[in-house]
Every structure is written in C-alpha cells, then in structure tokens.
Image: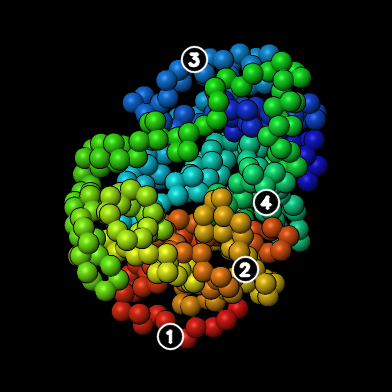
Amino acid sequence: MDMTKTRIAVAVSGGVDSLYALVALKERGEKPLALHARMLPPDLAPTGYDSMLDRMGEICVSLNVPLSIIDCADAFADAVINPFVRAYAAGVTPNPCAHCNASIKFGLLLDQARTLGATRLATGHYIRLEQTETGVALYAGQDATKDQSYFLSLVVRERLNFAVAPLADKSKDEIRAYLAARKLDPPAPGESQEICFVPNDNYRAFLESRAARIGVQLPGPGSVTLLDGTVIGTHKGLWQYTEGQRRGLGIAWCEPLYVLAKNMENNTLVAGGAQSLGGCEVWTENCNFLVPLEKWPKTVFARTRFRQKPRPVKATFIGEHLVLAEETPSGPHACGQIATVYDADMRVLAGGVIVSPKGKSEGDGKFLKGALPL
C-alpha cells in the first residue's frame, strides 16, 4: 500500500508521544486527521482536561490538521472500567490498558477513523510493525525502556493491519528533542497516569466507589494462612492483594512473606516465604495468536509483567489453554494480567490472559488430559 496516497488518522491523547506521531506524519507528506477519544466521564476526567482539549485544538489549527473528538465514555466504561472492577471483585488483577487497546483504540476508535475517511490509524505506541506474507507483524519498539508491545498483544491481526507506528525506532529523548526544536509543547502536562481512569492512582478508593455504583460486592476480610493451612493473620479483602506481592501484608513474621494465592471459595489469602514462590507454569486463556502455531520457532520467550525481561519458556497447548513452562521460576503469576510470547527477534507471537491452573470454568481438572507440545 502506498501510504502517501492514503489518509491516516492519528489518535492524539494530548501527550508528547501522540503529538510527535501527528507532527512527524504531517512533515512526511501525509494529510493526517487528529482523533481524540473522550473516554472519561466528567467525574473521572483529570483536572484541566477541557483546557487541554482547547490547547490541542490550537495546535491542530497551527498545523492545519482537522481535529475530531469522539465520545467513547459509555463504551469505555462497558469495555474497560466496569470489567476492571468486576475482575478485582472476583479476585484477579486485570490489565485494563491491554483490553483498551484491543476494544477501544483499535476497536471503536479505528472504526470511527474509517467512518471519517481514514484508511489507517496511527498511535503514539512504542512498537514496530512490519508487513509480511501473512499480514502485519508486531515487534517490540527500539526503546526497550518504553516498549509497549506487551500491551498490544491482545489486538487481533486483522486490526493491526490498519495500524501505523511512527515511534518504532525512536526514543523518548529523541521525541522530546524533535518537538522542542519545533517549539511545540504537548497540551497534557507530564506523563499519563498508570491507569487513566483511577484518580491519583488511588485504586482502593476508586474500586470501592465504582463497585457500589455498579452493584458489585467487594469481598471482605478473611484469614491469611501458610501453605499448610496455619492461620497467621487477617487480610482486608482479597481484592486488595496480588499474587507475588511482598509489601503491605501487615504481618510480622520470621521472614518476608509473599502472596502465593487467593482462595475465593473460602476467602483465604495464602502466603509464604521466598522458598515457596515457585511459579514455573503460566496458564492462559482467550489467546490472541499473531503468528500461527505451526510457524512458531522451537525457542520462545514470555513476559508476564510489563517491566519483565522476556524469559525462555516451553509452550504447550492444553485444551483451549496456552501453557508456558518457564526454565527458571519467576514467582507467582497474577491472574488477570497478560502473558505475551515473543520470538528471539522480539516479534510478538501471541498474547493471553493469565488464569489459575484450574482455569475459569473447568475446576475439576479434566481438561488436563491430552496435553500436546507445540
């Protein structure tokens, strides 16, 4: 596809990365359309949000680029915010950014872009995209400290075919210098929050407030036990803890304690010392395959946390579950987070949601039969 003959929509948040994407494409000779998704209702919008939109409009006028503001608040609440709350209530730790990319940015927003006449959607993600015989290939961005391929591993390949990644080979410092040289200041101050809809990163207050609003019951206090069942304390509610967590347990013990598991059936938090961490296998469901299984290399690597360096794993497909066996245990894996699988060149092969070994709906373990190595 000759990209100079297509109109590219650019998802602009107000931050430095998306502003760079817009300006770089404009200077490359494209005729971009700026799209801003209004995803938060007024009570969750950050302070100065309307002023930021006004400033964004001024920048677009100076660039002679049209700006369209899309109201995605209801869709974002249905697809991201409310499932986030329900997941915590169910004892798992979700990754809302990964689901937002799949359902909102490369879902609803891409659809809106195409309705407005754009053929592709550019974003400020630090990723690299390459076209292959079987479609687009998603790679980690060159700046390893900012790489966001982990968060895009749930976006289906058919949608990635419409994506443009102007930041593929750029670093944060290069992008800031580029904009400074053009005397362009991003309208949104500083970096974005870890999760955009949680005010001041206060998860507990947000979850309590939102759960009450949508009629979700957050589990209350219960027992903290060791692996052998010995009760050693009381937790404040399983939704307030994550597998692998070390700080915040509030229990004086002879060694540092880690959260090993959460038992929702009896409202029990299981804790133990470092020698109990284990975590050799990662079970995933709802896997999004960006490379067909038959084309996977023998050696693959996985991330189960954003900042984690990809680790060698052996991949096995069991029933509908992709199971990743680590060569070196990296501790308990948080259910609800994303496991992203790469090849040696940091090409994303697949992404899936981490679940407990028993899975969500097949707790009797019958699905364990018939395991086949890839």
Residue at the location (37% across, 50% down)? 247
The secondary structure type at the circle numbered 4 is strand
Label 4, on which residue? Answer: 140
Q: Is residue 267 left or right of residue 179?
A: left
Residue at the outermost front position: 254
The secondary structure type at the circle numbered 3 is helix
The secondary structure type at the circle numbered 1 is loop
Q: Does 70 sit above or below residue 258?
A: above
* Residue 229 horizontal/vertical position (percent): 23, 71
Q: Is disc 1 surrounded by few (<14), some (14 to 19) or many (20+) residues within 10 Å?
A: few
The answer for how far apart the CA atoms under marks 3 and 2 are is 47 Å
Instruction: Point out the tag, 3 or 4, that comes first from the N-terminus.
Output: 3
Instruction: Point out the tag, 1 or 3, that comes first from the N-terminus.
Output: 3
Find residue 312 and name its label: 2
Label 3, on which residue? Answer: 51
Amino acid residing under circle 3? Ser
Amino acid residing under circle 2? Pro
Q: Is disc 2 surrounded by few (<14), some (14 to 19) or many (20+) residues within 10 Å?
A: many
The answer for how far apart the CA atoms under marks 1 and 3 are is 58 Å
